[in-house]
Image (cartoon, helix red, strand yellow):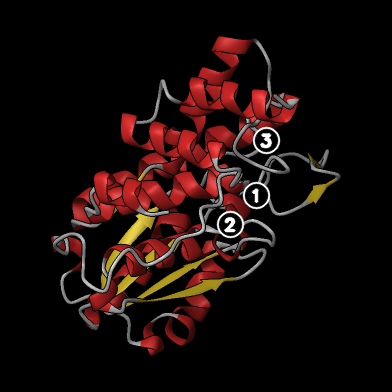
Amino acid sequence: MPRKEIKIITNICVIGIILSAPIMVYLLIMLSNGEAFAPQVHKISENNIEQIPRALLNVHKIVCIGDSITLARYPVKGYVTLLRDYLHAIYPKEKIEVINAGVNGNRSFDLVNRFKKDALDENPDLIVINVGVNDVIKDFSNTQLKADGVRHIEMAPYLANFKNMFSLASLKHIRVIILSPTTIMYGYSEQANQANQVIEQYSAGLENLAQNMNIKFVNLFNIFAAMNNSYYKNTGVHEDILTNDGVHPNQLGQLIIAQSLMTALGVPSVARAQVR
């Protein structure tokens, strides 16, 4: 067996400690078919294979707004594309439209500035918001944080930007799901650790905000950190297994974001496992 496949299998076994069994099996099936974690999603039948979950009732259009993690870079298939493909395969009769409104380099106040044009004016039934990495640190050089220290937007204005977007969506009776930012160069350096401490604080603040406003929330930071910590604990190797460059999720990372989002939406894991 090629070394690359051995390494991937090792990663999957470690990740299995964190992931649920259905997703673990799903990843192994993908590897056996040589799909490198990028499933080619096809419609299973003309009819829905599952009853539409409550969170997707009367949802015909979804806008996912965020930064480059939402936009995703070719050849990586981003979580927005994966979400669209899975929903089309599992609920073909619903014909749910999924729009990618990710923009490279965006921070939370950038999203506020374009929220009306890029999200509200699309008249969606659901908006997914994911932003925060660039709020913590804007400049990167050769995948290393620059030496001028961790610059970040303070917690209060960061959360205020989310409150602003939620209020605007509420006025139009649009549902919202918040995804926390993911990790940055996890475990690479003391400076990266400081940046991740800020993101962890952001995520905790967002979770509290979501609870108070009755918004669905997915803590991607905790998921990514737990997986990387488990990998290090079991291998002794500091290696970010979920990103290509310490920041942008690789195919496995994007798949995990998509799967976590679908869990929040109530899409059954059994149905997802049937999608090939």
- Comparing 238 with 163, the one in front is 238
Three-letter code, disc 2: Ile
Q: Residue at x 33, y 29 (%)?
A: 21
Residues marked 1 and 2 touching at CB (< 8 Å): yes
Q: Is residue 80 left or right of residue 263?
A: right
Q: Residue at x 58, y 59 (%)?
A: 77
Categorize mark 1 by other alpha carbons within 10 Å: few (<14), some (14-19), many (20+).
many
Where residue 185 sits in the image (x, y, percent)?
A: 67, 35
Q: Is residue 69 left or right of residue 220?
A: right
Residue 188: mark = none
Query: Residue 252's image quarter?
Result: top right
Which residue in the protein does label 1 denote? 248
Q: CA distance from mark 2 to mark 3?
A: 14 Å
Where residue 16 sits in the image (x, y, percent)?
A: 43, 24
Residue 185: mark = 3
Three-letter code, disc 1: His
**Residue 206 visible in this rendered orientation of the protein:** no
User: Could you tell me which secondary element the residue under label 2 belongs to?
Assistant: helix
